[in-house]
Amino acid sequence: MNSPLPIFPSHRFPEDFVWGVATSAFQIEGAAAADGRGESIWDRFCRQPGAIADGSNGDIACDHYHRLDADLDLIAGLQVDAYRFSVSWPRVQPDGQGAFNEAGLAFYERLVDGLLARGIRPYLTLNHWDLPQALQDQGGWASRDTVHRFVAYARQVVARLGDRVATITTHNEPWVMAVLGHEAGIFAPGIRHRGTAMQVAHHLLLSHGLALQALRADGCRAPLGIVLNLSPIGPATDSPEDRAAARLEDGRSVRWYMDPLFLGRYPDDVWQHLGGDVPQVHDGDMAAIATPMDFLGVNYYTRGVVSASGAWRAEDSGKPLTDMGWEIVPEGLTELLLRLHRDWRLPALYVKENGAAFRDTLEHTADGPRVHDGQRTAYIASHIAAVGDAMAQGVPMAGYMVWSLLDNFEWASGYAKRFGIVHVDYASGTRTPKDSYLWYRDFMQLQRARRTARALAAEALTAN
Ligand code: IFM
């Protein structure tokens, strides 16, 4: 449908507010066997029958590994300030320990240098889920040894890239790795055991804190932090049962991560609820996890609604849904940011992912191929406005990034769900910027024009 694109949010964003776009290694790179890359847990998981909705895998994905320069040009064309990407651990250290792979490290050096040459700040993530399979064979994140392997990997990557990147994120969405990967079993490595999931969550947090300490001791000057997937969680009804269930879910998905990171302790109510499934915590772990961070990244897609019976369904809520079946609730982002600001003492706060999957149609028009993705554009515009609303209510924000640059491998959903602002034809690899890309580019131009106008006004003031 070719509906008019939404107008730009009228909020004023500060001059140093960082606008960006994000991807992750496994979802776009492909080149699974190229140049000495090792196997990841997602390579293995994709081969389990039924694990991925369309039976696909990451072997080729968007073939970004072989199309790096063209993709960097697409990012530059957007005129964003920043690009958030992740390093594939098995590409740079195939076994997760021991020797590093020079070709893998060289790829990320080309990526970082290519961004800098185009005037774009690189935002590096060390772990966006693709653990080397060799480490999984020794217990994966459930094993405390992986914590130390991650710190060693982080030090090596940062030794090579740390002087040129704008920020470094340790982990992306530990809740997803722990709970979807080890309790629900619907993501790699496909384990279904709550106690294991909670141990994994603890090890991810611990490795984050220890990595921060080690990187700073090594002299790393880039800001360091973590990225969490968070939502405001509310009850389906006002009944005491639903309210208790929502409070517990808030504990498991929000406070279980925020409290240790910012208060150095796990929330009591969740600890009691877990009974025998609580993680083993050694002396000193909680202090390490609470090592001060330079920034917190938040990924927001939708709100959470909980009923004690489990009967609540997004389809019945009356809200519009994305192709993932997720409700579109931009005001939930404002609510979340206000709550984070109220309940914890935060460092610089970013939205590091926000976007939506919709069923796009590639149309062949007289002007060439087009994707009229008005719903995605409206989603992005309304969520940028929601960030602006939070700022107007006193929440200092450092930046916002769209998920995702390209249509890509959406984990257990395979390639059927398209989040990109650039359409990817997987058969040919052809990229087509969608209307949302053009809208975001024009919005970036407006932000840049405002910055220039403000700088000129300041200059004129000083001159007088
Ligand atoms: O595609 C994912 C991404 O890898 C992590 N955050 C959520 C996105 C959409 O599901």
Image (cartoon, rainbow, N blue to C red):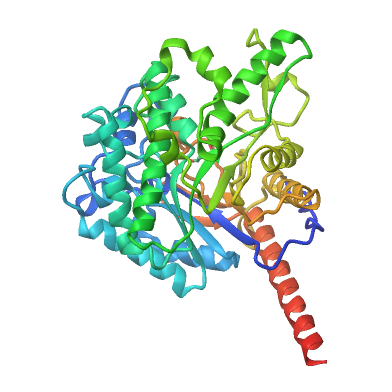
Name the residue at 73% across, 61% down. 13
Q: Quadrant of the C terminus?
A: bottom right
Q: Is residue 196 above or below residue 111?
A: above
Q: Quadrant of residue 432?
A: bottom right
Picture coordinates of residue 409, whole percent (x, y)? 44, 40
| Drawn side of residue 413 relative to residue 361, left or right | left
| Residue 248 placement: quadrant | top right
Residue situated in front as seen by the camera: 53 or 452: 452
- Name the residue: 26% across, 27% down: 139
Position above or below: 246 against 79: above
Instruction: Point out the image quarter for the N terminus.
Output: top right
Q: Position of residue 72 (x, y in %)?
A: 46, 64
359 or 394, nearer to the observer: 394
Q: Image point 60% across, 39% down: which residue? A: 357
Residue 365 sits in quarter: bottom right
Q: In this view, does 356 lie to the left or right of 261?
A: right
